[in-house]
Amino acid sequence: MTASRSFLVLANSAAGSADDAAVDAALAVLRAGAEVEVVVPEGPEEIRTALRHAAGREVVVLGGDGSVHACVDALLHLGLLDATGPVSVVPLGTGNDLARGLGLPQDPEEAALVALQGVPQPMDLLLDDEGGIVVNVVHAGVGAEATAGAEEIKGALGTAGYALGAVRAGVSTTGWCLRVTVDDEVVHDGKEPLLMVTVGLGSSIGGGARAVPQAQQGDGVADVVLAAATGPVARAAFALQLRGGHHIGRKDVRTVRGRKVTVEAVDDDNAFRVNADGEVAGPMRSRTWTVLPQAWSCRVPAGAPAGA
């Protein structure tokens, strides 16, 4: 048959090569229904080069949240988010939180079939004041510290490594004095320390930890979770409750919603790290994120709930 569709496939070199069984399985499904070009970019510039030559083809990302982040970032800054149409994701990372939140299959063949048969889901973006983006969740404080802890053990434990990293970081830290402003209203003045500030378009981090369980992609606003669980027992309990999203019911946790969020350290001693879609940056004194409503789209299974 003559394929009527054409895909540019970006395969994450860190997640596997063209010989990897999962990659091969996904590509076999894609090639059965479309013309496919596979590119394995080694960095941001090679991603941009590949996307400049997408020529109207839909893009399929074989990788995790970081790979999707890099692809969408390049499309945004190249002005090609509309030109390439919906992005499809075959989740081959460790956490795959964006894919989980969208109801995408974790099986590579089933996910590749969604690229062929799925429907576009409007997706919001967060744009920060340094030009960076967030496609799923960004968090400051103990969550960012937990990522470093999880890196040491995730090879052996997979997504469970994040939970253990969160427990370890939660027990050891005393929090950060941060001023948080949402839509020009100060919602935390920084006089009391915060354990974690989370800004979510999607709901989970760290391979399924439901940090922002109420978030819905594509609704045009970000959900913000402020956790002030800074006592020794409270820190440990918060870290354990985070996995299932049960922390939201705690008295020392507050949730707000908005389209512009600023987090500021009250002084140099409270400079903080941020984790955006699994990538850690900082320490920094300030960062602002603004929602770009329905800036891109992602293919999801037909019949999936809107904003899943």
Image (spheres, grey):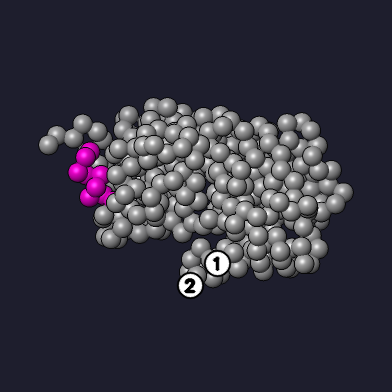
Kindly identify which numbered label has been placed on residue 3: none
Q: Residues within 10 Å of mark 1 (few under 14, many from 20)?
A: many
- Residue at 25% of width from left, 41% of height from top? 36
- Residue at 53% of width from left, 37% of height from top? 217
- Residue at 47% of width from left, 53% of height from top? 96
Residue 251 image point, x, y percent = 78, 52
Residue 171 occupies quadrant: bottom right
Spatial CA span between label 2 and label 1: 8 Å
Residue 8 occupies quadrant: top left
Q: Residues within 10 Å of mark 2 (few under 14, many from 20)?
A: few
Q: Which residue is mark 1?
A: 161
Return the disc, 2 or 1, that comes first in the chain's sequence: 2
Look at the magenta stretch and give its main secondary structure: helix
Residue 207 image point, x, y percent = 51, 57
Number of numbered labels in the structure image: 2
Q: Which residue is mark 2?
A: 156
Q: Is residue 278 visible?
A: yes
Q: Secondary structure at mark 1?
A: helix
Q: Is residue 79 above or below residue 132?
A: above
Asked if the stretch drawn in magenta spans residue 31, the answer is yes
Magenta extent = 26-34
Name the kind of residue labelled 1 in the image. Answer: Gly
